[in-house]
Image (cartoon, rainbow, N blue to C red):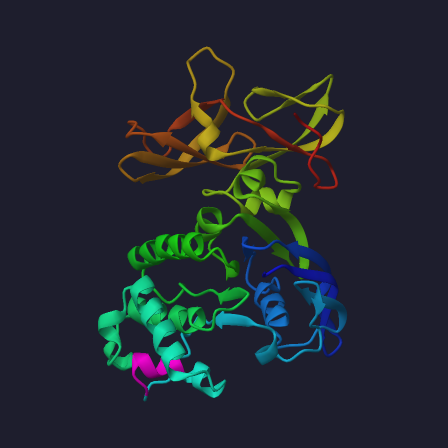
Amino acid sequence: MGRIALEGITKNFGNVEVIHGIDLEIGEGELVVFVGPSGCGKSTLLRLIAGLDQPTTGSIRIDGKDVTRVSAADRGLAMVFQSYALYPHMTVRQNLSFGLENTRMPKPEIASRIDEAGRMLEIGDLMERRPTQLSGGQRQRVAIGRAIVRNPSAFLLDEPLSNLDAELRGTMRAELARLHERLGTTMIYVTHDQVEAMTLADRIVVLRKGIVEQVDTPLGLYNRPQNLFVAGFIGAPNMNFFRTRASAGAAELPGGLTIPAPCDGEVTIGIRPQDLKLAGDDAPALEGEIRLIEALGAETVIHADAVDGTPLVTVLSGQPTLGTGQRIRLAFDGLPHLFGADGKRLNQD
């Protein structure tokens, strides 16, 4: 259970269309992440699936059943919000049981589900506390527990970790991954954080301005982005882009380094910062002037300006002895990404 299909989904707010004809299938037990910049429509799309908003056109199916006009309460889904949405005057146990009591579920079944969620999320000793007595991470566990006790066909999570500090986000991210593995239930997760997307997802849906730009596995997106937007959005630091012309099967980068190109004409070459390393004195190189150094210990991030003024970033291992204003020569050691004048990926092996 938990198969979700979107067919031709659009959403208008007044005269403004914010979701543009989305088709998407989510398989049973998948953890699918919606990612994209602010305002791209990812939370709106999640609300449409949840039934909190209605699409302007198109249909939504859950396990083959058309639920487009079915109320949120009757879709068999559970949503976890960014704000936790806990009742402050209730204890943890009361927060967990409230929705089940409204369905007139027998009390022994309610108690069993709450105990199981408490063990799973390690909140059994918090049952008599109120939300104001809990840390941010504990509140998030309770919010997830309230979804778990409903035994839904799918979980919908709307930026559930964004209110937590960086260390706790990392811990909760690992806990969510383990939870999905234990439950095997379909999860749709919305985030603007690509690290969360890359580490959690079975598949990632990259959105921009209400359009799906690409759907793929995390490594599929990283290794074979289908257009310039996806290439620039996935990966940290961002991919370097160099606009140039290709001829005779090659394209030249600033400084004289050449890259094989499968066509002639205007191209954009994308190079990940991790695929650049310091070049030998006599080797062909991508050249620039260092303007900022981020010394992170195990690695060093170098920000430079290429000889033609194009921004250039590289990630070097260790702690190389370099300074701002110094010239830097970089060799390429990795997979180049080539895009045509239309911004779409050129065919590459």
Instruction: Indicate whether residue 295 is drawn in magenta.
Output: no
Tell me where residue 337 appears, x and y as whole percent: 61, 32
Left or right position of 33 against 134: right
Does 14 sit above or below residue 282?
A: below
Predominant SS of the magenta segment: helix
Left or right: residue 60 versus residue 112 is right
Location of residue 149 (image quadrant): bottom left
Q: Quadrant of residue 20?
A: bottom right
Vertical placement of residue 186 versus 216, above or below: below
At 45% from the left edge and 32% from the top edge, which residue is drawn? 274
| Residue 154 place in picture, x, y as percent | 54, 64
Report if residue 273 is visible in the image. Answer: yes
At a point 52% along the width and 66% down the height, the residue shown is 156
Bounds of the magenta segment: 90-97
Residue at x-position 23% and y-position 79%: 133
Residue 57 occupies quadrant? bottom right
Residue occupying the point 55% across, 53% down: 30
Which image quarter holds the C terminus? top right
- Seen from the viewer's position, the closer of residues 215 and 296 is 215
In this rendering, position of residue 127 left or right of residue 65: left
Q: Is residue 256 left or right of residue 104?
A: right
Residue 116 against residue 240 in the figure, above or below: below
Q: Classify 278 as above or below 87.
A: above
